[in-house]
Amino acid sequence: AQSVTQLDSHVSVSEGTPVLLRCNYSSSYSPSLFWYVQHPNKGLQLLLKYTSAATLVKGINGFEAEFKKSETSFHLTKPSAHMSDAAEYFCVVSDSGGGADGLTFGKGTHLIIQP
Amino acid sequence: DAGVTQSPTHLIKTRGQHVTLRCSPISGHKSVSWYQQVLGQGPQFIFQYYEKEERGRGNFPDRFSARQFPNYSSELNVNALLLGDSALYLCASSLLGGQSVQAFFGQGTRLTVV
């Protein structure tokens, strides 16, 4: 079984300051992990993915995430927030052991950017 | 290049009715998955189809069914609609059936049951 917990439902930062969105996961197999972003009235867009290669993953728009197996974490960071980053962010885990459980999404973190 | 397209974009149905939602994957993609996103929650997995066969099913009642056609497009059917079925229904396509492969999502169909 796989699950993911996003530790913050809302995060508010000032423009130009760092962003940290926290995610912990649980998986019976070697997981694939993803971060997706959802802007209002738009589809889900993949930010980055981890699939057992390098533990530090770089994504689009300056985002990156680090896979820490010992902590079962996959936190999303960005050095400097931009107003356009305001959106809903989802941490996602997938069982790469061949199961057909689909992608398991967290409940989401709403990122607010203060001017 | 066209992305994943879903139709209709919005739909209003009455309790007890039936609904069919449609999805066209990205050209060349053979896998389609369906997700339900209730307001304020993350998407929940409903079905995955690959090469016209069901490869996975989430924890949804038998009122939910789906199929994939020879051109890899897909339909999601929901019978005997309940108020709780009101949600954004998302379709995702990927090249292969493995879940570690990147999934591309459509804009979704917003279903309202009254």
Image (cartoon, rainbow, N blue to C red):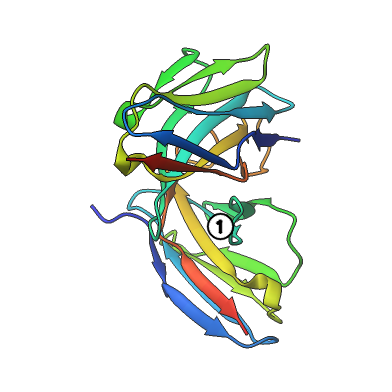
| Relative horizontal placement of residue B101, taking residue A29 as reference (left or right) | left
- In the foreground, A103 or B111: B111
Q: Quadrant of residue B40?
A: bottom right
Point out residue A74 in the picture as x, y percentages from the top left corner: 56, 23
- In the foreground, B55 or A4: A4
| Relative horizontal placement of residue B3, taking residue B57 as reference (left or right) | left
Disc 1 chain ID: B
Point out residue B104 in the picture as x, y percentages from the top left corner: 41, 47
Q: Quadrant of residue A81?
A: top left
Judge whether B58 appears above or below A77 on screen. below
Tag 1 secondary structure? strand
Identified at 43% across, 34% down, the residue is A13
Amino acid type for the residue under numbered disc 1? Trp
| Relative horizontal placement of residue A29, taking residue B23 as reference (left or right) | right
Q: Outermost residue, left direction?
A: B1
Total marks placed: 1
Judge whether A79 appears above or below B92 on screen. above
Identified at 45% across, 38% down, the residue is B102
> For mark 1, what is the residue?
B34
Quadrant occupied by the C terminus of chain B: bottom right
- In the foreground, A36 or A16: A16
Identified at 62% across, 26% down, the residue is A31
Judge whether A56 appears above or below B47 on screen. above
Q: Can residue B101 be seen in the rendering of this structure?
A: no
Point out residue A95 in the picture as x, y percentages from the top left corner: 65, 32
